[in-house]
Each structure stands twice: as structure tokens, then as C-alpha cells.
Amino acid sequence: MNLNRKSLFVLLVLGLVMMMGLAACGTDVSETDAGESEAAEASDMEDAGEESAETGEESAEAGDIVAAYVFTNTGSVDICELFLSPASQEEWGVDQLAGQTIAVEGQFTLKNVPAGLYDAKAIGCDGAGEAIGQLDIQN
């Protein structure tokens, strides 16, 4: 059982590392092509987990509010807690999930988050471990 939890934790960490790498390759979405990009994102989700920011503005400067940021669980365990902290700070913010769970391959939309670089801590359900990575929230 202990080996099983370690394996799940390693897979969760690897999934988050891969997800963070994909976050650095985000794209811009304008209001005119938002519908097309949402359909493309849905098909891309089958290949690998990714995050995306969706807003009607051309670009988001650091501190600008991003309307929505989709977080995808690419790990092998459900996530019960998700904390964000601006990369320049050491304190974690509140649990973004507020009692919700992100299932494996499930998504959660972060809303009204200021653009910028964040540390993210995902905690697996039932003590399955935790993983820390970075999110670059932009338009």
C-alpha cells in the first residue's frame, strides 16, 4: 500500500511538471475566435493536460485581471486542494477549490485572477501526496 501511494505521488508530480511546461506555451484568444479555440482546446485535452487563459483582451500585463484560467488535472489522483501564491511571496493563498474536487483529467476554472507568475500547490485526496509547480497566468 505504501509503495502504491509513493507511485501515485510520483505520477502526480510528473503530471504537474508536464502541465507547467505546457502552461508556458499558452496562446492568445480574442473574442472573435473564442468559440473556435474552445473546440480546439477540447480536442487538445485528450493528448495532454494543459492550462489556458481566456479573456477578451489582446494581452494581459502583470496584475491585470484574467477572466478565466482553466486548470487541468493531468496527474493520476484526484486533487482536493489547490493553493496559489504569487511567485514573489512565500505565503499560500486560500484553497481555490473551496471543497470541490478535480478528478483525474478533470478541469477547474480559476476566475478573476491577476495575471502573473504563480506557485501552485496541488494536494491529492485522501493523503495521496502533494505537488508544487508554477503557473504563468496570462491572456
Image (tube, grey):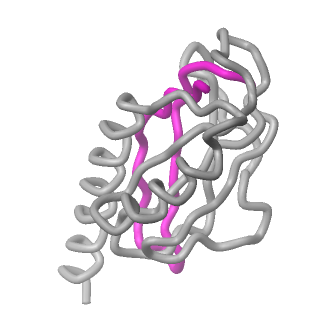
Residue at left 49%, top 75%? 78
Left or right, 129 with reference to 110: left
Left or right, 82 with reference to 73: right
Q: Compared to 16, does 133 lie above or below? A: above
Q: Compared to 38, does 64 lie above or below? A: above
Rendering coords of residue 26 (x, y %): 44, 32
Quadrant holding the C terminus: top right
Residue at left 53%, top 42%? 52
Residue at left 58%, top 29%? 137
Rendering coords of residue 114 (x, y %): 74, 24
Confirm whether the magenta stretch covers residue 103: no
Q: Compared to 100, does 92 lie above or below? A: above
Residue at left 72%, top 52%? 95
Confirm whether the magenta stretch covers residue 137: yes
Rendering coords of residue 46 (x, y %): 34, 68
**Observer-nearest residue: 71 or 6?**
71
How many labels, in total?
Answer: 0
**In which quarter of the view is residue 116 placed?**
top right
Quadrant holding the N terminus: bottom left
Rendering coords of residue 33 (x, y %): 61, 40
- Which SS type dominates the magenta stretch? strand
Left or right, 48 with reference to 126: left
Question: Which region of the structure is painted magenta?
Answer: 114-139
Seen from this angle, which residue lies furthest bottom?
1
**In which quarter of the view is residue 5 placed?**
bottom left
Seen from this angle, which residue lies furthest top?
61
